[in-house]
Amino acid sequence: MSRSSKNSLGKSKSAKTERKTNSREAGSFGQIIIPSSLDYLPKVDEYVERKLRRLGVDKDKLADIAISVTEAVTNAVMHGNKNNKRKKVAINLKADSSCVEITVEDEGNGFDPEAVQCPIEKGNILKQAGRGIFILKCLMDKVDFVIAPQKGTIVKMTKFLS
């Protein structure tokens, strides 16, 4: 995680949802920054779906992306930022004619994605939690993690449109 990304999250002055569009970066079409509270999930979902509909993303791909964003933001709030409302979660959207790329960035301590147990293995199948990363990998075409211990996690998800 770059120092400037971290600083931009930490300098948010409002507890309300912030929205901005960065037209200078090629393919970038929006960002929403929220406090670490699941109460903001409906705002994130509404924002992402509205942006994707404007791009003309088909209904099935839109649903896959929306579900994945909800899972990634939930993980960022609960596991990354530990529900600390002073910490922020940033959701960035980029797109071109071939794909949509969404990043979800928290301010937590980071984690080892390889250490997360597979939810469909014996012994895990009946567990109530632990399916978020599995869902991301099933619904999105590409999922990458950038882990900066004690500085946060960035989940980068890509959905190809053609």
Image: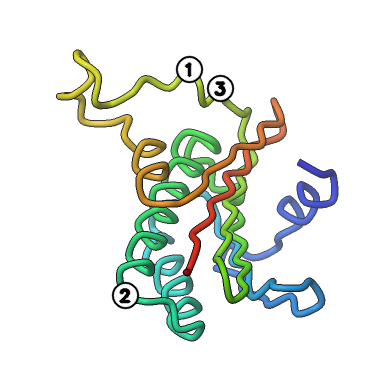
Q: Secondary structure at mark 3?
A: loop
Q: Amino acid at mark 3?
A: Asp
**Distance in Å between CA atoms under marks 3 and 1:** 5 Å
In the picture, which quadrant includes the N terminus? top right
Task: Identify the residue at horizontal 69%, vertical 25% (top origin).
Answer: 149
Please give the count of numbered marks on the rendered protein.
3
The image's mark for residue 97 is none
- In the image shown, does 111 or 145 lie closer to the viewer? 145
Q: Is residue 47 above or below residue 66?
A: below
Q: How is the image coloured?
A: rainbow
Task: Identify the residue at horizontal 62%, vertical 48% (top origin).
Answer: 105
N-terminal of the pair, mark 2 or mark 3, is 2
Q: Secondary structure at mark 2?
A: helix
Residue 95: give x, y in percent of width and height: 61, 71
Residues packed near mark 3 inside 10 Å, few (<14), some (14 to 19) or many (20 plus): few
The image's mark for residue 115 is 1
Q: From the image, tell me which residue sits under label 2.
A: 59
Residue 20: give x, y in percent of width and height: 67, 76
Q: Are marks 1 and 2 in contact (CB under 8 Å)?
A: no
Q: Are marks 3 and 1 in contact (CB under 8 Å)?
A: yes
